[in-house]
Image (cartoon, rainbow, N blue to C red):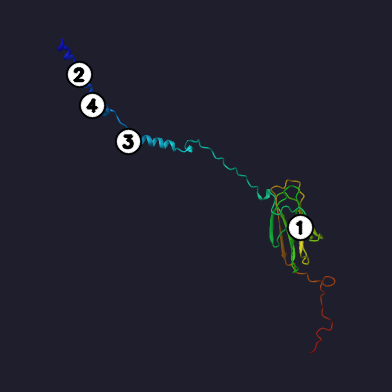
Amino acid sequence: MKHRIARHGALVALITITLLVGRPALGAATEEQLPTATPTATAAASATQTQTATLPPSATAEPTSTSQPTTTATPGANARPDDCEKNNRREDACPIAVDTVNGPFTFIPEGDQDWYRADLGEPNGLQTTVFVRASGKLDLLVSISRDDGTPLTAYSSPVISTTLAADISGPIIIRVENRAPDDPVGSSYNIEIRKTLPPAPTPPSQSGGTIPTLTPDIAENNWIP
C-alpha cells in the first residue's frame, strides 16, 4: 500500500513538472504560428484611408448646366432712328456736308420730321444743287431757307432736286417731311449737295430777233482805188 501511494505521488509530481516545463514552449509555438500583418497590407490600407480623406468635394458633385447668353438681332439701318436724331426742331438741325452724299436718314418714330444745316461757304460764282432721294413709300416735302429763317424754295415728290443761285452763300437750313400715310419703317432717304458752275449766259438777241440781210446798193462796182 505504501509503495502504491509513493508511485502515485511520483506520477503526480512528474505530471506537474511536465506541465510547468511545457507551457512556455507551447506559448512560444502558439505565438510563432499566429499570422502577422504584412507591411504591404498596412501600407495599402493607409493609402486607401489617405485617398478617401483627401478626395475633393467637387469630384462627387453633380454637373450643373451653364445657361447660354441670348442674342438680340440688331434692326436694319432703315428700321431704326438715324445718327442725326433727335433733329426734329430747327434748333436741333443736324450738320451735313457739301459735295457728298449724306445719309441714309429715316422717319422713325412715325410722324418724325428732320432738320439739317449745310454751310455753303463764301460766294465763289458756283451754284448749289440740293438732291433729296427717297426709297420705299416716302412722299417727301423739302423746304430750304436761309439760316435766319428767310425762305428760299420748296419742292415735293416726285421732284428730287432744286438749284440755288450762285449768290446764295453761308449756312442754309433744309427741312424734310414725309407726307405718306404708310408706315415709314423700312424706308429711307439721303441728301446730296453739289456746287457746280452755272450754265453759260445766252447771248443777247438784236431787236426783232433776226439779223437783217444786207444787199448791194445800186452804185455797187463804182469803187476806184
Label 2, label 1: how far apart the Cα atoms are: 142 Å
Q: Secondary structure at mark 2?
A: helix
Pick whichever, 146 or 214, lies toward us.
146
Nearest to the eye among marks 3 and 2: give it. 2
Q: Residue furthest left?
A: 3
Q: Secondary structure at mark 1?
A: strand
Q: What's the residue at 23%, 21% (across, down)?
A: 19
Residue indicated by mark 3: 39
Mark with earlier residue (2, 1) = 2
- Nearer the observer: mark 1 or 4; the answer is 4
Kindly identify the residue that appears in the image at 20 percent across and 18 percent down: 13
Instruction: Tell me if label 2 and label 1 are in contact, CB under 8 Å.
Output: no
User: Label 1 vs label 3: CA separation?
Assistant: 99 Å
Could you tell me the amino acid type at mark 1? Ile
Q: Are marks 1 and 4 in contact (CB under 8 Å)?
A: no
- Residue 7 location (% of width, % of height): 16, 14
Q: Name the residue type under label 4.
A: Ala
Neighbor class of circle 1 (other Cα within 10 Å; few <14, some 14-19, many 20+) is: many
How far is mark 4 from mark 2, CA to CA? 19 Å
Q: CA distance from mark 3 to mark 4?
A: 28 Å
Which numbered tag is attached to residue 174?
1
Residue underneath mark 4: 25
User: Which label's residue is closer to the chain start, 4 or 2?
Assistant: 2
Vertical order, 162 against 79 (above or below):
below
Label 3 secondary element: helix
Q: Which mark is residue 13?
A: 2
